[in-house]
Amino acid sequence: MSRIRTVVRRSLWVMGIVLVAGLFLPERGQMPVVGAETGDWHPDTFWYYPWGRSGVHKGVDIFALKGTPVLASSGGLVLFRGELARGGKVVLLLGPKWRLQYYAHLDQTVGDALWLAAGEQLGTVGDSGNAAGKPPHLHYSLVSLLPLFWKADAEPQGWKKMFYLDPLAHFRGVGE
């Protein structure tokens, strides 16, 4: 019985160290669409209201030519690479500070690695999912797994701002 307790304690210590270490990993935050400039998205795209079935747009749409390379904004573990009804072809990464990076409406995904370094190509800009028939773009969302309570406000669905972070601030390197 004492051997089991020792194994459990060690496992909890390791999990705790991994959890804390993830919070302190450096976050690079580069623009994921090759060649994108500030004119390639609307400055108010994040938290735009009203927005379709979701009510609020919880990311940024970066417009580019179909087939333009999409890069990992910061390094991360690939949690999902596949297709979803609304997002189309998507890649989901778990990156530094326990943040999910969601890349949607891709024309194609590239590679099958479980880990992507910052700047490594993960796909190309497209119009898959509910973007079909619309101009090609990347929908990029940044989601904190740990709630940031001070970010909540009175806007529609404003309580969700504890989790959905402004990707444009991430690209500028502004810390959250």
Image (cartoon, grey):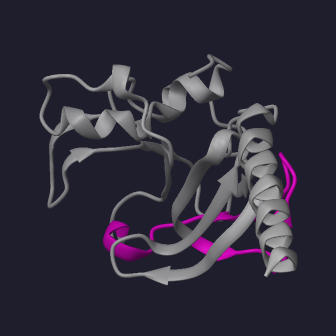
Q: Which residues are magenta?
A: 107-131
Residue depicted at 81% across the width and 31% down the height = 26
Query: Residue 19: x, y in percent?
Result: 71, 48
Q: Is residue 114 visible?
A: no
Q: Nearer the viewer, residue 133 or 97?
A: 97
- 73 displayed left or right of 99: right
- 13 displayed left or right of 97: right
* Quadrant in the picture for the C terminus: top right
* Quadrant in the picture for the N terminus: bottom right
- 147 displayed left or right of 158: right
Quarter location, residue 25: top right
Q: Nearer the viewer, residue 37 or 10?
A: 10
Residue depicted at 60% across the width and 28% down the height = 170
Please tell me whether residue 107 is drawn above or below residue 49 in the rendered image: below
Residue 122 forms part of the magenta stretch: yes
Residue depicted at 66% across the width and 57% down the height = 94
Residue depicted at 14% across the width and 27% down the height = 155
Quarter location, residue 56: top left
Q: Is residue 10 visible?
A: yes
Query: Residue 27: x, y in percent?
Result: 75, 33
Query: Residue 146: x, y in percent?
Result: 50, 42
Query: Residue 92: x, y in percent?
Result: 60, 65
Please tell me whether residue 65 is drawn above or below residue 73 in the rendered image: below
